[in-house]
Amino acid sequence: MISDTDNPMVYSVIFLKSEIYKKMKTETRFDSFNFDKEIIEALEKKGFEFCSEIQEKSIPTIMQTNKDILGLAQTGTGKTAAFGLPLIQKIQTGNRVPKAIVLAPTRELAIQVCDEMQSYTGKKRLKLMPVYGGTPITNHIKDLKAGCDIVVGTPGRVMDLIKRGALKLAEIDYFVLDEADEMLNMGFIDDIETILASANDYKRVFLYSATMPEGIKKITKKYMGEHETIEIAKKKFNSELIKQVYYKLRYSEKFDALAKIIDVEDFFYGIVFCKTRNDVDEVAQFLRKMKYEADAIHGDIAQNKREKILQKFRDQKLHILVATDVAARGIDVSNLSHVVNFSIPQELETYVHRIGRTGRAGNSGTAITFIGPKEEWVVRKLERITNNSTIERGTLPTVADLAQSNSNRIEKEVEAIMSTGAHKKFQEMTTSLIAKYGPEGAVSALLHKMLHKEEVKNPAHERMERGNFGGGRDDRGSRGGRDSRDRDSRGRNDRFGGRDDRGSRGGRDSRDRFSRDGDRRDSRDRFGGRDDRRSRDGGGKPQLSGDDMRLFIAKGTHDGYKNREVVSYIEEKAGKIRSKDVKACGAFSFVTVSKSEGEKILKAFKNEKSSNGRAVIEQAQ
Ligand code: AMP
């Protein structure tokens, strides 16, 4: 049941959703549950007819039993309706304090979940409220005072509201943790535990997570009663339509490589995934400096700006989007031609989500992954988690490749022009040129004129020929003439099309600016207005006793260091230690030791510096 629409964008989103649902829908119809008329009407309006698997299993458990739920399901499987519909059915309207709370990792997700749930309420006058950081807390306090039935929020803002006494969970009947593993990844474990502990004992807990890390097991044991485990088999990864390629590069080499890859491709409509928002900014800045039309989204970019960027991207007016995983979660675009993993994801499982945005609906796609010089093992692991698919090692395009790609493109363009007959208006001029210079002479002179322009327009090509990276020459003023936008209509990348030719490329070698200085510069996380837990501040730190010291180690799972390796790495230099807590994350780790051992370690590593000049081991603040 797809509603009619004239808007092609809306149509394509609906089409993609229907693609997903073809795969995961069940035979169970929503009208087989005893939902109120208002809800059934709302679902009909949304075009929901058959349940997805997670809905088929969650809805009866919530409606007909008193059990908690541990739901293991990936994003996009219909979790919101799985818990949202029964909550909306069961909760009475007009509550003074909320009867249900849903925690979601980011403000995008909180808004998305709240809007989605609101859309199920139809004429039932339930008051749902999204609460998240980055907006004045006073508004939330005021709205909560006016009464509310269901709160959907990020852990940071929910904590703040509880602390201020504005949000009370004493009468909560339902506590939902959505994308729980993602919240843990973001370092929200302490907040979540505090929030859970501040609620009453009789609440039911519904925890949904794509993976089952230790932290989730702990929450399940500590805060959940008798529960039903609902596991939805992971969608089989189908690698047939996705070509997977990896490049082994140092961080500073990745920028130029990215430019070359975009240049050599016939069509590029893709997301470049980075680990931190600093990286996102650097990559987007670089691409823009190189005159690609690229934009960035991450948590530090204002909500309304982010929405505008996303809309531009969905409409394919913007062809390159640089994003963090978290910011990209709410993007409902999956018909990309390319996905670039500028850095490998913190959780390798995320690779599957990332690259699943390409190679859809019968179209082929390319997934490109940049790995560091010592990260070959990651490729093997990625192959395993993608059903033993093959990830080939790629070689970067050469000058000849770029020239060939230009030539192919021009041939295609000539073909397209000939098919429309648009060239006929130049008949007279053509006859006169041929009469004067002969056919070969006339065409090759015109090609020279055109290709010469193309070379200038192709920064990666130009840089290779000049053997530098940025140069300082501004060729753009002298060209004039053709409107570069004319190729847009044939689906070319904006990079070659609607770009702004005005600016100079600047004189500085861009490698200066794009050298690696890592995640650690990123110190504020404005998701929920909280500190970035992944920075050197102690990453979701446990309570330390006065005799403990927590250390930040600039090595992590991405460097091949799991907990045990982190300890061995320290012991190699500092001698045997008795670690009280070790946590290896992506690019860094935390270790808690006694103060005296901490001092010993810091002394032993005094002269050990990372490539960015910072100490490899520091005391976490
Ligand atoms: P979720 O996993 O809850 O974020 O849902 C992903 C998308 O699928 C949302 O846009 C929902 O509106 C849509 N959706 C969820 N359940 C169904 C269903 N049973 N039939 C059709 N669309 C659905």
Image (cartoon, rainbow, N blue to C red):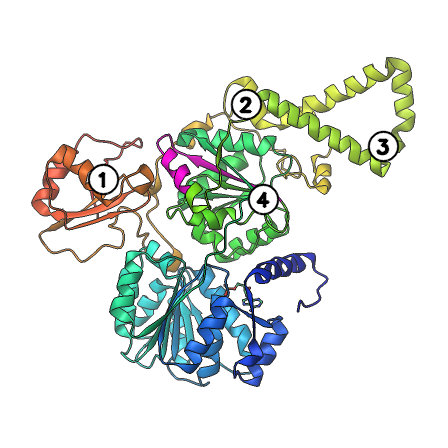
* Residue depicted at x 39% and y 76%: 100
Residue 241 disc label: 4
Q: What are the residue bounds of the magenta stretch?
A: 364-382
- The amino acid sitting under disc 2 is Arg
Q: Which residue is disc 1 drawn over? A: 565
Q: Secondary structure at mark 3?
A: helix
Tell me which image quadrant ligand 1 sits in.
bottom right
Q: Residues within 10 Å of mark 4 (few under 14, many from 20)?
A: some
Tell me how far mark 3 sits from mark 2, CA to CA. Answer: 33 Å
- The amino acid sitting under disc 3 is His
Mark 3 vs mark 2: which is more N-terminal? Answer: 3
Compared to residue 69, the image places residue 281 above or below, namely above
The quadrant of the rendering that contains the N terminus is bottom right
Closer to viewer: mark 2 or mark 4: 4
Q: Secondary structure at mark 1?
A: helix
Tell me how far mark 4 sits from mark 1, CA to CA. Answer: 37 Å
- The amino acid sitting under disc 1 is Glu
Q: Position of residue 338 (x, y in %)?
A: 56, 42
Tell me how far mark 1 sits from mark 2, CA to CA. Answer: 41 Å
Q: Which residue is disc 3 drawn over? A: 423
Q: Secondary structure at mark 2?
A: helix
Tell me how far mark 2 sits from mark 4, CA to CA. Answer: 33 Å
Asked if residue 378 lies in the magenta stretch, the reply is: yes
Residue 563 in view here: yes
Pointer 3 and pointer 2: residues touching (CB < 8 Å)? no
- 388 relative to 191 in the view: left or right: right
Tell me how far mark 3 sits from mark 1, CA to CA. Answer: 66 Å
